[in-house]
Structure formats: structure tokens, C-alpha cells
Amino acid sequence: MPNEVERRRWNDEQMVANWPKRERFTDAITSHVVTALNPQPGETVLDIGSGGGKLSLAIAERVRPGGKVTGADISAGMGAMASARAAEAKAKNTTFVQCDVQQDRIPGAPFDAATSQFGVMFFEGPVAAFTNIRKSLKRGGRLAFACWQSGAKNDWCTAPVLMPFAPAPPPHAEGAPPPGPFAFGDPKYTRNILTGAGFTDIERVAKTVVVKVPADSIGDDAVIPSMGIPPEKFEAAKKALDKHMAKFAADGGLSRFELKIQVFTARVG
């Protein structure tokens, strides 16, 4: 089954339980995505990899009256969290569905626009995924999403610190980065994916967003087993992680991170 590794990872109960902490790290990006998408009243919008639903809910405010937002995520737990938040916010124009956007027919299509906040870098077949996204949009439909710049530019990234303790990653197609947070770090690679999927008018804007949040928003103990690090290496990995995170300590018990992101926009011809 495509995306089986990511399917297991994002349906892990601990991953879902820790998600509100992770959101503290990236909440500052939401306004940038909404601005790039520029949703209008009455439009229908697809949110790809909708997670806890915060981006979907922000867009839902903008498409009233008459508009609707569909959040699609491979994780049942994330969808349940998002649905609960929508109910609490009385956002009746927002629906969350569990599906694999790489291959599944997306309920609610065709949409006026599609968007994502760090949810599009995890597909095993990114061209196939974006082709499916394009087919779910109306002619002239818009795409706007945020992804990370390279891991090298995001010095807070914990992967280089923890990888020595983790099993070797599975092989991937030669020349293509494996699915993961920084898979779209190379702008040329990402443009080629979008072009190959049939998108046009592709634009990219690089941004730096500074946040001050609790250190465990990114570097807590749960990160270690999530990378497949075995229990016998936990303590050594934790020591390395704690040393890394100490570099970002700021005032008030918070940590300061510079988030190097890029926002891509494109259209369906």
C-alpha cells in the first residue's frame, strides 16, 4: 500500500497526543499560508494533510458565507482532533475526512483552491499526489502551500542529532529525497514536481519566521522513539538531543527558533 510508513507514523497514538505541542512551533505560519491562498467568500477549499485542523478553521472564516473547507489527512486521530475543534468553534462549513491524497478520490471535489501547511512533503509518489490534487481542482484553481527550506538552513532540526542512533532509512528512488519534513527543501526539485503534475504559474517566496515557544514543542522525549531509535539507545540519544536543544534557550523558560520556510503558489491551466 502506498505511503504505508507514513500511514503508520501519523496514526500512532503518541504522535497524535503530542500534536498540540508541535502546533505551538508552527502556528505562526498559518497567516502566511492564508495570505498566499487568499480565500474568498463562497469558495470551496481542500486542506491537504490538515492535521489538527487549525489552517482549515482559519480558512473557513474567510470563505463564509457559502464557502466550505474539506480537510484531508491520512491520520484518523488527527481527523478526530480537527473535527472536535470544528464542533467547538461551530464551524459548520468545515469537514474532515481520512484519506490518502496521493491516490484516493477526495470527497467534495472539484475545489476552487487547495492548500497545506507542512502536509505535502510525506508522499512516496509526490508527482502522483500532486496530479491527484490538480485533478481535484476546478480549471483555473489555485494551490498555495508552505514547506520547509532545507534542513541545513533550519538549524533547530533534530534529525542530524538523532540519526546516528536510528536504523538506516529504507532505500528510495535514486536522486529523490525520501518522504519527510525537508523533502521539498530544494526549490528546483519542488518546482519540477509541480510542473510534472501539470501545474502552471509556479511562484516561490522564502520567509524567515521567528518563534519563542517551550523547548518541548519540538525536542521532547517522544521524538526519539518516533525515529525508530531502540530503547537501549534512548539515554544516549536523549543526552545528544538535550545538548542540541540547549543552544536555543531564551528568556522565560522558552526557546527561540528561526523557521526557514518557503511558500509555493501555482494554478491549474
Image (cartoon, helix red, strand yellow):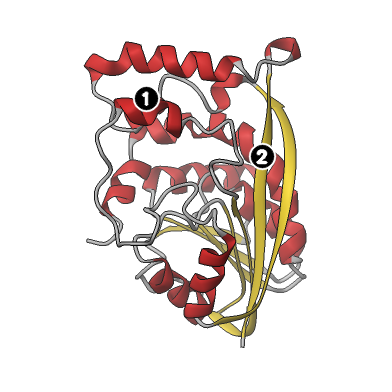
Residue type marked 2: Leu
Question: Which residue is drawn at the image coordinates 62% and 68% (left, top)?
Answer: 45
Q: Which type of secondary structure does the marked residue at label 2 adopt?
A: strand
How far across and how far down the image is residue 60, in percent?
A: 68, 59
- Residue 134 vertical placement versus 27 (above, below): below
> Residue 233's x, y, as percent?
27, 17
Question: Height in image: 129 above or below 82?
Answer: below
228 and 70: which one is in front?
228
Res 122 → quadrant: bottom left
Residue that badge 2 annotates: 259
How many residues crowd around disc 2 within 10 Å: few (fewer than 14), some, or many (20 or more)?
many
Q: Decide: few, some or many residues near mark 1? Use Cα within 10 Å; few <14, some 14-19, many ≥20.
A: many
Residue type of the residue flagged with mark 1: Ile
Of marks 2 and 1, which one's residue comes earlier in the chain? Answer: 1
Q: Nearer the viewer, residue 130 or 244?
A: 244
- Disc number placed over residue 87 in the picture, else none: none
CA distance separating discs 2 and 1: 21 Å
- On the image, the x and y values in percent for residue 11 come to 34, 43
For the point 48% across and 21% down, which residue is it? 220
Q: Is residue 91 in view from this perspective? A: no
Picture layout, residue 39 above or below residue 245: below
Image coords of residue 228 (percent x, y): 28, 32
Label disc, if present, on residue 224 of the rendered structure: 1
